[in-house]
């Protein structure tokens, strides 16, 4: 089901379909609520937010009215980092925000996982999943949950930028070299940089260089997102 979720979110045609897909995936991971936030920085102190979630309406009223996001340690982590954060009550207590955790815990927000992707041109995407029971104690199971969320976030990012943000400008296709395209194609097939180098008859270091150049030209933060964007633009098949 998870594999299908990765692909389904890419096919979302509008905001409602996108919301349905992220909520469905979150529940498949065992989380009750999901929040996806797309941000565009417009300048100092000016940002546009597009939020898609299934949060209880009562929770949104309390959270937004008190401007709690400005002191929420999870939101602040995602604002400045791309590494996932696994959070629970202790995350808030260590930051002196125990009262904030108590407030949101009443609505089922007791623990969860969140992460953000920061793109060029001031674009950001955050995805968080939350629930009212502890996360798995088994380290391997928890690692799998984080990995699943990371991979889904990359797919959801591509869909969010397409269906949630206005895009009236014509698409200016980036110019990738044949080697960069080949590296992306083999990466799409699950090959590592070392394997790509062996297939193309180049060193692993050179293969990494081609992938990094492709990521830069496509405005992507990792090779998985670069593959997805190249597919969407028709650069690879």
Image: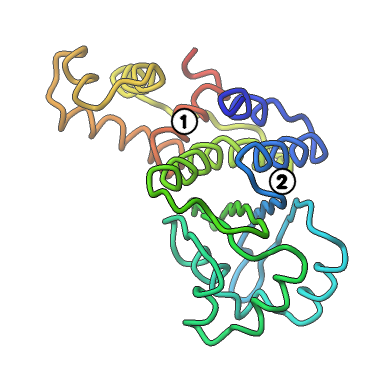
Q: Position of residue 62 (x, y in %)?
A: 81, 76
Q: Is residue 7 above or below residue 48?
A: above
Residue at 68% in and 41% down: 27
* Location of residue 202 by image quarter: top left
Secondary structure state at the residue bearing disc 1: loop
| Quadrant of the snapshot with the N terminus | top right
Q: Is residue 101 above or below residue 34?
A: below
How much space separates mark 1 and mark 2, taking CA atoms? 20 Å
Count neighbours of disc 2 (C-alpha within 10 A) and say few if under 14, some if 14 to 19, many if 20 or more. Answer: some
Circle 1 sits on which residue?
Answer: 174
Label drawn at residue 192: none
Nearest the camera: 218 or 39?
A: 39
Residue at 83% in and 39% down: 16
Residue 213 shown left or right of residue 206 in the figure: right
Q: Position of residue 172 (x, y in %)?
A: 56, 32
Circle 2 sits on which residue?
Answer: 165
Q: Position of residue 223 (x, y in %)?
A: 38, 34
Q: Position of residue 124 (x, y in %)?
A: 56, 55
User: In terms of sequence position, does the residue under pointer 1 or pointer 2 come before the other?
Assistant: 2
């Amino acid at each position: 089901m998870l594999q299908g979720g990765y692909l389904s979110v890419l096919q979302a045609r509008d905001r409602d379909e996108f919301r349905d897909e992220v909520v469905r995936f979150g529940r498949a991971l065992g989380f009750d609520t999901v929040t996806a936030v797309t941000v565009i920085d417009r300048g100092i102190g000016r940002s546009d937010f597009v939020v898609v979630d299934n949060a209880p309406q009562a929770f949104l009223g309390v959270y937004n009215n008190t401007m709690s996001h400005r002191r929420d340690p999870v939101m602040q982590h995602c604002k400045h980092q791309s590494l996932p954060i696994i959070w629970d009550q202790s995350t808030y207590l260590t930051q002196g925000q125990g009262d904030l955790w108590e407030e949101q815990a009443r609505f089922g927000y007791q623990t969860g996982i969140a992460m953000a992707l920061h793109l060029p041109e001031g674009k950001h995407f955050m995805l968080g999943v939350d629930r009212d029971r502890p996360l798995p104690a088994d380290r391997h199971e928890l690692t799998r949950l984080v990995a699943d969320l990371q991979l889904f976030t990359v797919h959801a990012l591509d869909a969010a930028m397409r269906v949630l943000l206005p895009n009236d400008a014509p698409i200016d296709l980036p110019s990738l070299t044949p080697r960069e395209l080949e590296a992306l194609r083999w990466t799409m097939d699950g090959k590592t940089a070392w394997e790509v180098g062996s297939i193309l008859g180049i060193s692993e270091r050179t293969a990494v260089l081609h992938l990094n150049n492709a990521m830069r030209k496509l405005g992507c933060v990792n090779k998985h997102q670069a593959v997805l964007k190249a597919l969407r633009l028709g650069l690879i098949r």
